[in-house]
Amino acid sequence: MSRLRKDHRTVDRRRFLKTAAVAAGSIVVAPNIITWAAPANERIGVGVIGAGGRGRDVMGAFMAQPDARVLAVCDVMRERRERARDLVNQRYGNEDCAAYIDMLELLDRPDIDVVLIATGDNWHSGASIVAARAGKDMYCEKPMSVAITESRAVSDTMRRLGRIYQCGTQRRSISNFQFAVNLARSGKLGRLKEVHAEEAGGFKELYDTILPAEPEPPREEFDWDRWLGPAPWRPYNAKYPTRGFWSAHLDFSGGSITEWGSHTVDLCQWANDADDSGPVEYWQEGERFIGRYANGVKLVIRTGLRFGSCPVRFEGEEGWVETGDSGQVEVYPASLMHEPWFPGGYPPDNHVRAFLDSVKTREETVSSAETAHRSISACHVANICKRLGRPITWDPVKEACIDDEEGNRLRSRAYREPWYL
């Protein structure tokens, strides 16, 4: 991912192998592959990259696991990294947690086995690839990429280096969503016709505004260069790092479709048994974006569903089911509610537990890099359709727009030196 500047510390692969070899656990070394499995009684060392509100929430779920211990935190904003450090020290009753500005220093530590990546969307893919090259497994918040080529690079890197990757699409680990997906996949709704994915209500307008320059804060307070990362350079302005701005800015995110679609489109893909594929056509109907899969099922990206944030609805020829973060479930016919279902909640604890189990067993996670790549790709192609204002024909095997050079250019974004895919 990165050809690092000379004033940045690099991760020395030979030194990593030497230090990791004496750690508890086992290492199997093959060309370009490092695998590590922690003994069941060993604590897994955790580093946190990105310590904003969501990062602290998921960090709390890691600290709640008896076989994991947070050893260090990293954030480009002083207030966030110090707050996270203090939370860790308070949890463990000591002053041992280290706080870093630069993630490369955190990744250089051989006692850190896994990292939680909870930066802004702009850094999700890049930090994942750098972490994999440093020999770490990772739990990365959604969306896993800002462009299709990024998440493809992440998936390929995880496979090549043998790393364990789990995307923070935690609704795959929550029972009411599992219940709805299982109904759709079981055939009890009849032949599936439509899968509905809620789009976030905010961030609908995508823009690429360049704001006026403001005095840049000292690096210790806010490392502006590292916050920008691979995004195009521009002078500092305090509005950029605010979530309400960068979440709809094309240089940093994908707006409302990727914001909730990371979860809801992901669940629709799962319900349609399309974890390794995606729709082949996309078009817009009013404010809705429609995708059609090769099997005829329609993906409807929309607003107006019920039951809290990130709701989904699956419709078959003989019935339907709808659910969301409220935990409520409604089905038709009502007799389907007699199917086994155990109410669950929103917190990410189960998803974190599933990830740590995969770290130990080296088995694929419930939200693997390839699965998450396919889901976010469907969101990105919908955004291409939105940006161009016309239908898109998509080849999910070649991962390319068919006979559409303009659309294909939007599969990637330019990277600022020294960062590259």
Image: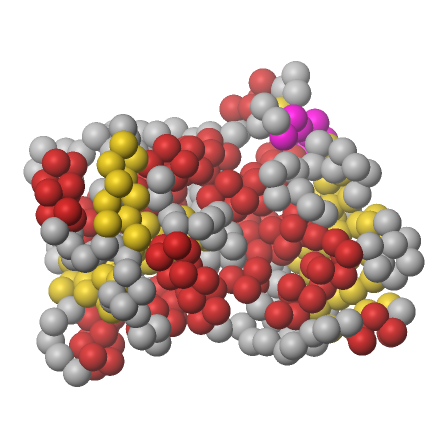
Position of residue 123 relative to residue 322, above or below, is above
Q: Is residue 185 visible?
A: yes
The mark tally for this picture is: 0
Report the residue at 27% width, 32% height from top: 30
Q: Nearer the viewer, residue 388 or 209?
A: 388
Location of the N terminus (image quadrant): top left
Q: Quadrant of the C terminus?
A: top left
Q: Position of residue 285 (x, y in %)?
A: 78, 43
Horizontally, residue 177 falls left or right of residue 371, namely right
Q: Residue 231 magenta-drawn?
A: no
Note whether residue 143 is visible.
no
Please provide percent x and percent y for residue 325. 61, 71
Q: How is the image coloured?
A: secondary structure
Q: Is residue 23 left or right of residue 118?
A: left
Q: Residue at x 76, y 61 (%)?
A: 183
Left or right: 76 with respect to 289?
left
| Percent of width and height locating residue 190 | 87, 54
Give me the residue at 87% from left, 61% from top.
319
142 is higher (above) or lower (below) than 78: above
Q: Which residues are magenta?
A: 387-396
Residue 52 location, quadrant: bottom left
Nearest the viewer among 129 and 112 is 112
Q: Is residue 240 left or right of residue 94?
A: right
Where residue 189 sits, quadrant-wise, is bottom right
Q: Nearer the viewer, residue 296 or 262?
A: 296
What residue is shown at x 30% (from left), y 53% (from top)? 37
Q: Position of residue 88 (x, y in %)?
A: 23, 74
Pick the front one: 219 or 190 = 190
